[in-house]
Image (cartoon, rainbow, N blue to C red):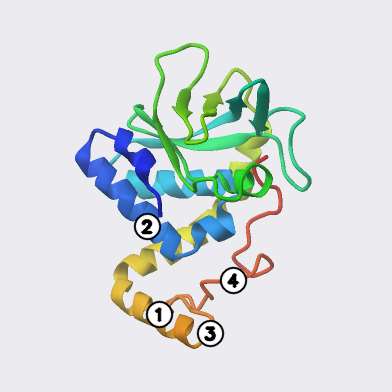
Amino acid sequence: MNTASLQVVQDEKLAQDLRLIAADFEILDFFHHFGSSCFAMSATLAQILTKKGYQARVQGCYGEIRKDNGIFYIGYQGFAHAGQKEGHAVCIVNEEYLLDFGLGTLKKHYAADFKSTLVSKIAGSADYLAHVRLENGADMIWRTDWISPMVELELQSQVASVERILAVYEDFQKNRVAYLVRKMFAANHHLPTFNLALNLPLNFPLDSPLVLSQSQAA
């Protein structure tokens, strides 16, 4: 996974923890299955970081990708894609960094090779929350001058789903080697891989018991 955006994190321990979390999310296919649900991804990430001793919280916002004279909105009012709710959510850690692990919508509607994670220092600006320059020359900007009222509702509605995602993640931490061996064996034999404790398929379809609500980030 490309975690180049984590280079902005100057705290070496935090940067190392974030690289490991991102790698584990990749192994567990969380980006594939839940990457379009920024609410669940941000809540999951915030809880993981809190348990590691960091100050972490979920922040509602919306995003803009600006290039030349065009703007692509993420979660802005009136710009939700079909089957999705208005609003976007990110994780704020130590009130210093913005972590966006819920960028799956951009892979679907902006660029198929868009990064799964973006990290930025919180800006000292009243105009925007954070800003990064993307590899294609565009500017990704997170703003809070409008926050969808659906953010809090979605976070509340997905509490149970987030708990189950966390259970899969935490079980993986306890059974890392056995889990990876089983995944490798299943991949070589074209079989589904399973979480050792919960018996949930790693490549579970979106109508599986672990599915999040269909109202996802815009």
| Cα separation between marks 4 and 3 | 14 Å
Answer with the quarter of the image where residue 20 lies: bottom left
Q: Is residue 28 visible?
A: yes
Labels 2 and 4: the sequence-earlier one:
2
Q: Earlier in the sequence, mark 3 or mark 2?
A: 2
Percent of width and height locating residue 28: 45, 65
Locate residue 61, reporting x and y percent.
57, 28
Q: Nearer the viewer, residue 151 or 160?
A: 151
Q: Residue at x 63, y 69 (%)?
A: 209
Vertical placement of residue 5 versus 198, above or below:
above
Expressed as whole percent of the image width and height from the top left, the position of residue 150 reads 68, 35
Could you classify mark 4 by the number of other residues whose Cα lies within 10 Å: few (under 14), some (14-19), or many (20 or more)? some
Mark 3 or mark 1, which has the lower sequence index?
1
The residue located at (71%, 53%) in the rendering is 214
Amino acid at dot 2: Ala
Instruction: Identify whether 148 is placed above or below 22.
Output: above
136 above or below 191? Answer: above
User: What residue type is disc 4 on?
Assistant: Phe
Distance between mark 4 and mark 1 Cα atoms: 17 Å
Q: What is the three-letter code of the residue carrying label 1?
A: Met
Helix, strand or loop at label 2? It is: helix
Say the numbered circle drawn on residue 190.
3
Tags 4 and 1 touching, CB below 8 Å: no
Do tag 2 and tag 4 residues touch (Cβ < 8 Å)?
no
Callouts 3 and 1 close, C-beta under 8 Å: no
Query: Is 132 or 122 nearer to us in this picture?
Result: 132
> 143 left or right of 56?
right
- State the residue at coordinates (60%, 35%): 88
Q: Which residue is mark 1?
A: 184
Cα gap from disc 2 to disc 4, whole angstroms: 19 Å
- What's the residue at 66%, 65% (across, down)? 206
Task: Please tell me whether mark 4 or mark 3 is closer to you in this view.
Answer: 3
